[in-house]
Image (cartoon, rainbow, N blue to C red):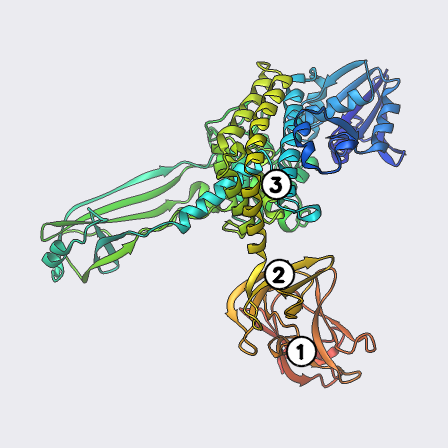
Amino acid sequence: MKIVIIAEKYSVAEKIAYYLSDGKAKRLKKKNETYFEFEKDGNEYYVLGLKGHVIELDYPEEYKDWRKEDLENLITVETIKRIKHKNTVDLVKELLSDADEVIIATDYDREGELIGREIIEIANYKGKIKRAKFSAVTKSEILESFKNLENINNNLADAAESRQKIDLIWGATLTRFFSLVSNQRWKNFISVGRVQSPTLALIVNREREIQNFVPKSYWDLVAYIGNIKAEHVKNPFWEKPDEIYEKIKNEKEGQVVKYEEFEKDVRPPIPFNTTEFLREATKLGISVGKAMTIAEDLYSNGYISYPRTDNTVYPKTINLISIVKLFEDSEYGKYAKNILKKDKIIPTRGKVETTDHPPIYPVKSIKKGELKGDYLKIYDLVVRRFLATLYNPAKILMNEADIDIKGEIFSAKGIKIIDEGWMEVYPFLRIKERPLTKISGNVKIDKIEMVENKTKPPERYNQATLIKEMENLNLGTKSTRHEIIEKLYERKYIEGSTIRPTNLGISLVDAMEKNNVDAVKPEMTAKLEQDMDMIEKGNNTKENVVNESREMLKKILKELFKNEKNISETIKNGVSSDKIIGKCPKCGSNLYLEKGNGFRYVVCSKYPECDFRFYLPKTGQIELTNDKCPVCGLPLIRVKRKGQNVETRCINPKCEYNLKNEILGVCPEDGGNIVVRQGRNGKKFAGCSNYPKCKVIYPLPQKGNIIPTGEKCKICNSPIVIIDYGKNKKKICLNPKCENNRGINDE
């Protein structure tokens, strides 16, 4: 009997083959694709890993040319399926041509089910089909899933296919409309999407709240008693409390009329679902998109469980004790042993309990050096969160004192950790202590203040708060929210870690909101999400949901055409506003930041009538500052490059301000200047200014400020510089092979 197993990725296929064959599977190659073969119980097994979707939805060739007159047809025309990975498909067809059984072992979610069904359909396979469901790529889970094979879930695949089709129709129609009316095509096209647009609208509307916010004054009365800060129980006062303040401002003594203290347990955090995992990952300085990519790689390589999940309750089928025991002899051993000492291990649980996948948890203990960088940070986060959910509660001491000052009651509150409990293993949610000394009787008042404050606008979203808000509004899914945020950054609609919309992002939302385009309303896209859930449950069909979304889009397109002129002007203004980085020093017109193939430059908006133009560094993210160059008065920019300190420079590349920061010394070969340069790979180095005639180059540390000393090395004549790392400084010869570097810092 010939059995073909289809996995979603090569790494998963490799592990499935290894576990099922007890390590005896052969690695074979055909049509430039690798697969595995082994025999077991008289059956021949073939295991192949895909690269995700092997086909993609697209429009017929006649709709490839963007034309406004085609937009209504884009909504109704039937999409086609194109093969993405021909070699893979050819190999699958060959393997399935005489197969007795196919086992789909793709990720168990909507997309995974659709990927499995796609491969069956494209190979035109009519034989027996089964489904292996697992949530971790471990030996026990793989073996168990293949003992308990199920049927493929067509409702799950239909839900994914309906989303795929709806997103293509909406994205293509709206993107083409906005790009065409604003003359923004090719690389500069205006991307609009069913989930992307309402998410952008959230950010823009928050920015409007901030910009339109009018601060309101309020007052706090505060009494200081030694190191204790006590606040009036009626704080804040929205009317200035002059009468109360005049009554008590000179008082030097108060009386403690109440003192209470009590211990309180702080419950450990709940297990990780996708949203909470991504939110916590941002605290490590890792973007939601990168965190998800790393988590998927860790899952595929057998380090953690499946990272796309809504579940916050560990199912009873998971042997929590055996997972904890994995870490007894690791750096987490202390925490694991503390958990295993407990009489009964009862994990925390959240409000959402699903049956598809468990919360995210570790499935393997690692050796030192096995994982590095952000991969190690994400793995560590998952391990610590898992252990914390099984740990003892933390204990805190809370106390409060009420002080009577001439009839006015002031309250001081304290909080102190008396038993760290789970906070020891998971410090990312550690409570901030505010100790309060026990006080009683009469107390000396050092001073009383009336402090005027201003109300503050709402905070901008960051990636963590935005992804949580998307979840609350049912925008996107656990599998797509991080991709939407990444796309908004890529399209230059938003910027910064505290997220601000660009002028282009604002103009796009303005163009839709002011012209009654429902595409920016969360309710509309949330309705489609609910419809897709109904498909998954078997209470609706993909045909009904797709057709309903088409009707919604037709109404939107009608409104767009009605307001085409206004939309065009709004977006064009936004595009040009984002280019402006200052005023031209020659004629006073706007200065534009322009980009081309492999170059960026600052140019006057009246060029060539005004010839002001300077080329900027080719690498790094450029930000305009509000500062002027102290040498020539032109704008200063910041250049951010990954792994390097932020560089501040004048827009004039030949300005002395830049040159003094770039020149590190004199070239020992021809007397030219040794200057800092940026390589194509994003790494900085030092080289002679007379290159290519002189080819002297030196590697440079990527971190730290490089300070020239004007000194030459006594051994090799190379420049001596100081590397300032902030906390410490190191004096070096630029020549890394020079023997002088061994003792130069001891001089």
3 vs 1, front mark: 3
Q: Residue at x 45, y 43 (%)?
A: 205
In which quadrant of the rendered image does the C terminus lie?
bottom right
Task: Of the two numbered discs 3 and 1 on the same chain, state the one appearing first in sequence.
Answer: 3
Give the alpha-carbon distance from disc 3 to disc 1, as whole Å.
47 Å
Q: Residue at x 56, y 27 (%)?
A: 555
Q: Residues within 10 Å of mark 2 (few under 14, many from 20)?
A: many
Q: Residue at x 59, y 15 (%)?
A: 540
Q: Position of residue 110 (x, y in %)?
A: 64, 25
Q: Is residue 525 left or right of residue 440?
A: right
What is the secondary structure assignment of the residue under circle 2? strand
Q: Residues within 10 Å of mark 3 (few under 14, many from 20)?
A: many
What is the secondary structure assignment of the residue under circle 3? helix
Residue type (three-letter) at the residue carrying disc 1: Ile
Q: Which residue is mark 2?
A: 593
In which quadrant of the rendered image does the N terminus lie?
top right
Residue 564 visible (yes or no):
yes
Q: Viewer-proximal residue, 363 or 206? A: 206
Residue type (three-letter) at the residue carrying disc 2: Leu
2 vs 3, front mark: 3
Q: Which mark is residue 102?
A: none
Q: Viewer-proximal residue, 470 or 655? A: 655
What is the secondary structure assignment of the residue under circle 1? strand
Q: Which residue is mark 1?
A: 663
Q: Position of residue 437 (x, y in %)?
A: 25, 53
2 vs 1, front mark: 2
Give the alpha-carbon distance from disc 2 to disc 1, as whole Å.
26 Å
Q: Which residue is mark 3?
A: 178
Task: Of the two numbered discs 2 and 1 on the same chain, state the one appearing first in sequence.
Answer: 2
Residue type (three-letter) at the residue carrying disc 3: Phe
Q: Position of residue 51 (x, y in %)?
A: 76, 34
